[in-house]
Image: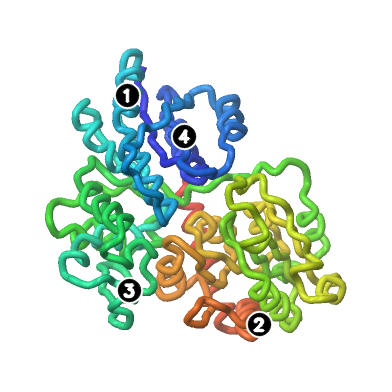
Amino acid sequence: MEAIVFYPSPPIGHIISMVELGKLILTHQPSLSIHILITPPSYNAGDTAPYIAQVSTAFPSITFHHLPTAALPPSTTPPTYHEILTFEVLRFNNPNVHHALLSISKNHTVLGLVMDSFCFHALSVATDLNIPAYFFFASGAGCLAMFLYFTTLHENTTTSFKDIKTTPFDVPGTPPVLPTDMPKPFLERDDKVYEYFLEGSYQMPKSAGIIVNTFDSLERRPLKAITDGLCVLNGPTPPIYCVGPLIVAKDGGGGVSECLTWLDSQPSRSVVFLCFGSLGLFSVDQLEEIATGLERSGRRFLWVVRNPPGRENRSVAISERSDPDLDSILPKGFLDRTKERGLVVKTWAPQVEVLNHDSVGGFVTHCGWNSVLEAVCAGVPMVAWPLYAEQRFNRIMMVEEIKIALPMVESENGFVSSTEVEKRVRELMDSEEGDSIRKITVAMKNEAEAALR
């Protein structure tokens, strides 16, 4: 029997993306079996067991293999980033990956190993076993262009990107990028996490191909730059396979959510939805500014609020964190004054279903790539408010390249005023510029549907 082995990094979001790719492959090749290697997380990143059990029951062709905990050398120092610890675990995981591939190979013909971009250390394992290795890049093609071009940027500079500040980089296929809009791990040349990302940038082109979660008409220019060989200057560029938009069809929250019932009573395209991902946490001061901006805007809103940092034990898994006490973190009387046109939801909302609801006309997002694709597939225009990872770069692509979002403008320390929140919400819902990006987003929705056919 023929099989494909998937190797995601430990966080549940990465596992979900790989599972969705596996499901897509099975729709085209139902005779294949999919095997997913699960690495024990290096920190409390959320319980994956219920999700894995659910997928195993629903998709018998998908098998999960739980790898042993990788043995880290005693010299491993406490890292400053979760990413460093993840890279360290994956680096020393190769013997476990090798053993799992040999075990699967006893009863299957392994057609390929598909790795998360964090898992580049396993490229040598696949080479040793003569198994074609592919990378799955869960962000967009613009971000992939930057990642592949990272080696060239490194070789052409001698100082840390954070010290360059005002000189934009010209990454092929993308608008000019200021160093401050690069992912945080790229900024400090002497940091260990910089070394790991740089090594990944050197290793990725050595694969048999790169699978990217996008579609051609969404990111035509960066895709052309990559396939024309403009991003990898020290060797050939492997084939690029666009499989997007790859999103989870339903959030699986179970039952009808309170917010969906509330949306049923709102006029068509009248509500702006604010949601910032599982790691999108704001200080109480920032939450108060958002609330004030929403109240002054006069627009209908649905806002997902999480506990501010410092009010949670960081060792508690994301899925187990407590709901916020809204009365203590939002301005006094805000909930009462806005109850006729706004709903604040604690911690979680079924994002895909909300975005596809007829009442929703705009989305204020942290610019995580999955959220961007979900909004595109729903035809909902955005306000881009990046918070971490590659999201600042995604904002450049969304605002300047694809033109499906307005930018939320923050101060130098990242703070956004209530005036800015009010202005952007009004622009998104009631302005010529808002109408323009709405038309482009709806056109992209149609292109996304065509790409999935």
| Residue kind at label 1, given as amino acid type | Leu
Disc 4 and disc 2: Cα gap in Å?
A: 42 Å
Task: Say which residue label 3 marks.
Answer: 162
- Residue at image point 73% right, 70% down: 301
Residue that sits furthest to the top in the current view: 107
Are discs 3 and 1 less than 8 Å apart at CB? Answer: no
Q: Separation of disc 1 and disc 2 at Cα?
A: 54 Å
* Residue that badge 4 annotates: 40
Identify residue for label 2. Answer: 418
Q: Secondary structure at mark 1?
A: helix
Say which quarter of the image contains residue 226.
bottom left
Q: Position of residue 452 (x, y in %)?
A: 47, 47
State the residue at coordinates (35%, 39%).
90
Q: Which residue is mark 1?
A: 101
Circle 4 crowding by C-alpha within 10 Å: few under 14, some 14–19, many from 20: many
Give the side of residue 395 with respect to residue 89, left or right.
right
Q: Amino acid at mark 3?
A: Lys
Mark earlier in primary sequence (3, 4): 4
At 39% from the left edge and 34% from the top edge, which residue is drawn? Answer: 6
Where is 62 relative to 108, above or below? below
Q: Earlier in the sequence, mark 3 or mark 1?
A: 1
Pointers 1 and 4 in contact (C-beta within 8 Å): no
Q: Measure how far apart labels 3 and 2 are at the Cα level.
A: 28 Å
Q: CA distance from mark 3 to mark 4?
A: 33 Å
**Is disc 4 placed on a helix, strand or loop?**
loop
Which is nearer the N-term, disc 1 or disc 4?
4
Residue 47, quarter of picture? top right
